[in-house]
Amino acid sequence: MSSLKSTIKSGIYAIVHRATGRRYVGSSVDIEKRWWYHNHRLERGSHFNLHLQRAWNKYGAPEFTFKVVELCHLEDLTAREQHHIDRWSPHKLLFNSAPAAGSTRGVKHTDITRANMRLAKADPVMRAHVGAATKKRWKNPAYRARLSANVSNGMKKAMADPMIRARMIAESKKRWKNPVYSARMKAFISARVKKAMSNPTLRAHLSETMKKVWKDPATRAHLSETMKKVWKDPAACARQSMVQKEVWSDPALRARQSAKMVKAWKRRKGQTS
């Protein structure tokens, strides 16, 4: 998407299928970020617009283009989006499900459709099918690389904005202050790490990766400077000290760490003897 030359970021955009001209028309207070969101969801196969998602899956990303239709002020967004929806609707060239701009009004599901949607969510077979399809996509190296690049670029853009970065940090801190959320996440992370580290192949891969990283003098210097800055902060030191005390107050963990250190010492002693 070409960068916007105006200070106005809000406006109307369209995701257009090149061959047919069929399009999804939308509005956003920040068009570039909205395009990142659409692209991210489409690549993951989880876009809320089923018609657009199916076309994307069928024809592929290169067959679609993202267009900035017009820039406008916030108070004009809904009116201008409705104008463009009305313009293309008679030609049956819209992916949009809702005839009203900025809402899902007008999208009428039958009783059968609503029942099917409820059943699909509760059906273990359907969930397994969706899971299998996702795993199949992830086995494709090109898909993984493309998705990784999209996520990485999106995060870089987001984190380059001081306001977005501050908001994300504040929201994360707020969540972690919730004891229920904190306990659940700690248990989840611990289980995932244990599962990953029980795989010898993954352990070997991580070991080789860390060796390569530490062989780079620039990386070592950067990490060293980062740690020096962190430890110059009294609050960070106090927080780290508190975490360590909490961790070492667990007898089971102390015993486990002690066993690891004894094992490592014996191995090192055997190598030097």
Image: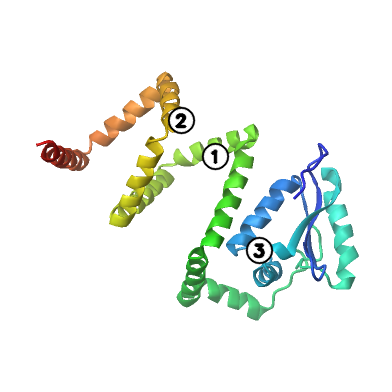
Q: Nearer the viewer, residue 71 or 123?
A: 71
Q: Quadrant of the C terminus?
A: top left
User: What color scheme is it?
Assistant: rainbow
Helix, strand or loop at label 2? It is helix
> Which residue is the site of mark 1?
171
Query: Where is residue 108 drawn, in percent x and y?
Result: 73, 72
Q: Is residue 11 shown left or right of residue 48?
A: right
Question: Which amino acid does the dot numbered 2 rest on?
Answer: Ala
Tag count in the figure? 3
Which residue is drawn at the image coordinates 12% and 37% (left, top)?
A: 269
Q: Which of 253 and 132 is in front in this view?
A: 132
Q: Is residue 88 shown left or right of residue 213?
A: right
Query: Where is residue 4 drawn, in percent x and y?
Result: 79, 43
> Which residue is the site of mark 2?
218
Q: Distance between the residues labelled 1 and 2?
A: 32 Å
Question: Which amino acid does the dot numbered 3 rest on?
Answer: Phe
Viewer-side label of 1, 2: 2
Image marks 1 and 2: residues in contact by CB distance under 8 Å? no
Query: Where is residue 83 drawn, in percent x and y?
Result: 89, 58
Q: Could you tell me if residue 237 is visible in this image?
A: yes
Q: Could you tell me if residue 199 is visible in this image?
A: no
Q: How far apart are marks 2 and 3 (CA)?
A: 44 Å
**Mark 3 / mark 1, whichever is N-terminal:** 3
Helix, strand or loop at label 3? It is loop
Q: Distance between the residues labelled 3 and 1?
A: 25 Å
> Which residue is the site of mark 3?
48
Q: Quadrant of residue 56?
A: bottom right
Question: Which amino acid does the dot numbered 1 rest on?
Answer: Glu
**Mark 1 / mark 2, whichever is N-terminal:** 1
